[in-house]
Image (cartoon, grey):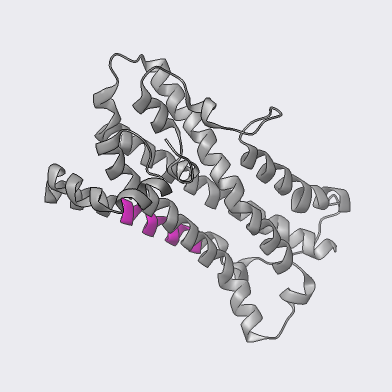
Amino acid sequence: MMNALNRSTQIFTKLMYVNGSVLFSMSLQRFVLFLIVVRHWLFGADGLTIAMGFINGARFDLCVLGFLNLPVLFIVWILSTDKVTNSTSKLVQLLRRWVLWIYFGVTTLIIHALGLFDLMFFTANRHRWTYYDWQDSGLSFVGEVASGWGGLFTFGVIMLFIVLWLFRSIFTLYKVQLNSVSLGKLKANESKAALVATGFLLPLFITALAARGTWTAHHINIEHSEISGVQALNQMTLSPVWAFDKKF
């Protein structure tokens, strides 16, 4: 029990940096959207309101990260057990080493791909791209927007999103290679209660709070994005992942 909690504590500490880099990438996507599209439609919105768009936007991004990290909690707890750690099975050790990297690689690829399509759709429609828009018009907007932007500029934007994902994947690979997580010797002050808090309770609390996006009784919703009378700015506040199953 103590060994498993010690391992999970070490892994969750590494994942703090990974999730921080994901949050940074999501905020950077919003900043790119602001620079390329939204700033042309502000109609006199003040600086404080624009700043609130990015602050509230981080809350929506954290909500997405919270949900994406729910499976991570169980993966880490399973991988930290003595049975898995001490297994001589090559398959088990292969999964132990790569499963988290694969998970973050796939989920962040989805985040970046949605962000790219959303940026193009937003240009023409002034609201986030959703599943319902995909059903109605498919990806026809990509060609229209690309022709309007110009080939070179479009290529530059696409490469930006690809490079962001590649750097994130490399960073995640560096941080979550579990073969580098050693059990180490438990210090005298590392009580069972402290390890339960850092290896179980605290990650669970932070993930659940992030998934709710707020301290209040009701979880974060569309109302939290309504910071001004400029609809494009309100839509920018939303996360493209959070908004994908909504209808505008």
Whether residue 183 is visible to the viewer of this picture, yes or no, is no
Residue 13's x, y, as percent? Answer: 64, 52
Vertical placement of residue 232 versus 10, above or below = above
Among all residues in the image, which is located at the extreme front? 136
Q: Is residue 246 magenta?
A: no
Residue ID at (51%, 40%): 61
Residue ID at (82%, 52%): 196
Residue 200's x, y, as percent? Answer: 77, 52
Magenta stretch: dominant secondary structure: helix
**Quadrant assignment, res 73:** bottom right
Whether residue 31 is visible to the viewer of this picture, yes or no, is yes
Residue ID at (55%, 40%): 62
Q: Is residue 162 magenta?
A: yes
Which residue is more in the foreground, 2 or 248?
248
Residue 177's x, y, as percent? Answer: 56, 67
Vertical placement of residue 9 versus 84, above or below = above
Q: Quadrant of the C terminus?
A: top left
Say whether residue 117 is left or right of residue 228: left
Vertical placement of residue 105 versus 115, above or below = below
Among all residues in the image, which is located at the extreme bottom? 89
Vertical placement of residue 42 versus 99, above or below = above
Say whether residue 157 is left or right of residue 17: left
Say whether residue 40 is left or right of residue 243: left
Q: How many badges with numbers are in the image?
A: 0
Magenta span covers which residues? 161-173
Residue 66's x, y, as percent? Answer: 61, 46
Q: Quadrant of the N terminus?
A: bottom right
Which residue is more in the foreground, 102 or 116?
116
